[in-house]
Image (cartoon, helix red, strand yellow):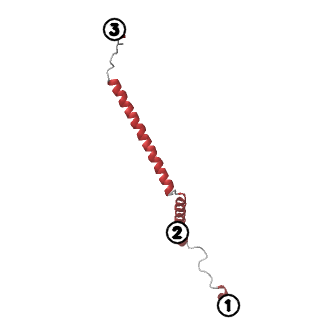
Amino acid sequence: NKPYLYYLVQGMPKKFVGENSKAAAAKARRSAVKDQQDTKRQQQIEDELWKDDDKHILKKQQKKDEQARKKQELLDKKAQSKALLEEELSSIKPVSKQPAAKITQAQIQ
């Protein structure tokens, strides 16, 4: 066999030359879970960077939406009043106007 000094320098020879299959499978599972968590974390960070939460921009957008809503309400109100006016005018019976006979100053006197 080999001399004692060889074992001090080299260490004892390994018992298993191959890889432990159970340990390798567990390591692969942990690695996959860690990769998935890392990608999820990176996605959240990217979403936060792209998130538009500027208060001034939000306030401007709300004001713009409010103005558009008021304008639409005004147009609806105008259309409704116009429809009511048309309905009212159509419901009034037209009075037949006969041209009034012209009266001269001489006839009045």
Secondary structure under tag 2 reads helix
Q: Amino acid at mark 2?
A: Arg
Give the percent coordinates (x, y) of residue 95: 32, 18
Does residue 102 appear anywhere in the picture?
Answer: no
Query: Which residue bears the numbered disc 3?
Result: 107
Q: Indicate which disc residue 30 carries.
A: 2
Dot in front, 1 or 2: 2
Label 2–label 3 contact, CB within 8 A? no
The residue wearing badge 1 is: 5
Return the x and y of residue 4 as percentages of the image width and height.
66, 91
Query: CA separation, marks 3 and 1?
Result: 155 Å
Apparent side of residue 74 relative to residue 52 in the rendered image (left or right) = left
Say whether disc 3 or disc 1 marks the residue closer to the N-terminus: 1
Instruction: Decide: is 98 above or below 81.
Output: above
Single out the mark in the foreground, 2 or 3.
Answer: 3
Which label lies toward us, 3 or 1? 3
* Mark 2 surroundings: few (<14), some (14-19) or many (≥20) residues within 10 A: few
Q: Secondary structure at mark 3?
A: helix
Is 81 rendered above or below residue 47?
above
- Give the camera-side residue of 47 and 72: 72
